[in-house]
Image: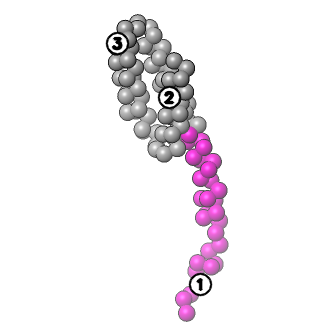
């Protein structure tokens, strides 16, 4: 179960690096479906399925938050350079 927790956190981090927050809705729905099918196939109890679902949903969201934070901090210096570029060079008349 620990390896699945790491996988869910990494999936969330990758999604946080690439997509907006609405991608979490289908990701969580697919995760719940996969966990339910897996628990039904292995014959584990309902309580274990609930615990795994709570862990998966939480770690996907935490991973997304970490990925979005990384994206924010990596993108800040580039966008700051663009905003603070001198406008005098861009507004010179063409001769």
- Does 71 sit above or below residue 35? below
The residue indicated by pointer 2 is 8
Q: How far across and down, in percent of the image, does residue 94 sit?
A: 54, 89
- Does 63 sit above or below residue 58? below
Name the foreground residue: 47 vs 94. 47
Chain-order first, disc 2 or disc 3: 2
Residue 92: mark in rendering? 1
Residue 40 lies left or right of residue 83; in this view the side is left
Picture residue at 42% right of the left edge, 13% below the top: 49
Label 1 near label 2: C-beta < 8 Å? no
Q: Cα distance, mark 2 to mark 1?
A: 53 Å
- Residue 37 visible to the viewer: yes
The residue indicated by pointer 3 is 40
Chain-order first, disc 2 or disc 1: 2
Q: How far across and down, in percent of the image, does residue 47 sit?
A: 44, 8
Q: Cα distance, mark 1 to mark 3?
A: 70 Å
Q: Which residues are magenta?
A: 67-95
Q: Secondary structure at mark 3?
A: helix
Picture residue at 55% right of the left edge, 20% below the top: 2
């Amino acid at each position: 179960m620990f390896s699945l927790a790491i996988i869910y956190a990494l999936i969330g981090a990758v999604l946080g690096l690439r997509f907006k927050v609405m991608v979490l809705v289908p990701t969580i729905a697919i995760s719940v479906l996969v966990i339910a099918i897996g628990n039904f196939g292995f014959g584990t109890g309902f309580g274990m399925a609930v615990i795994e679902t709570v862990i998966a949903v939480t770690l996907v969201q935490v991973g997304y938050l970490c990925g979005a934070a990384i994206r924010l901090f990596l993108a800040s210096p580039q966008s700051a350079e663009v905003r603070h570029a001198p406008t005098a060079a861009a507004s010179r008349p063409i001769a």
